[in-house]
Image (cartoon, rainbow, N blue to C red):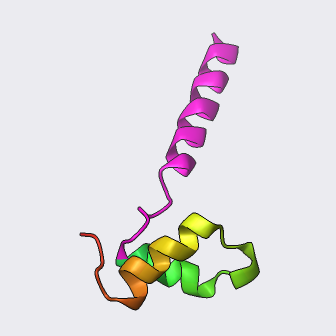
Amino acid sequence: MKKLLSISFALLLLASFSGCTAEPGTKAWCDNMKNKDKGEWTADEAGTFTKHCVLGNYKE
């Protein structure tokens, strides 16, 4: 029983961390990308940044 409880807690903790990233194109995502090293951006991230952050078309 104790092992099952520990596994359940670990899965719940893991699930809570996976939902912390902002949706691409939102204001929060744009702010995070501004702080991220440009060399680490993917081509998709760069395109999304240009479309939403540079042009100011943030997703709601």
Tell me the residue at 50%/60% (across/down): 21
Left or right: residue 33 versus residue 2 is left
Which residue reaches farthest right?
39
Tell me the quadrant of the picture where the N terminus can be found: top right
Secondary structure character of the magenta stretch overall? helix
Picture coordinates of residue 26 (x, y %)?
36, 72
Q: Residue furthest top?
A: 1
User: Viewed as shown, does residue 7 lie left or right of 56?
Assistant: right
Q: Is residue 45 above or below residue 35?
A: above
Boundaries of the magenta span = 1-26
In the picture, the quarter occupied by the C terminus is bottom left
Q: Is residue 56 above or below residue 8?
A: below
Q: Residue at x 55, y 65 (%)?
A: 44
Q: Nearer the viewer, residue 11 or 22?
A: 22
Left or right: where 9 falls relative to 59: right
- Residue at 37 percent of width and 79 percent of height: 52
- Residue at horizontal 65 percent and vertical 23 percent from the top: 7
Q: Quadrant of residue 43?
A: bottom right
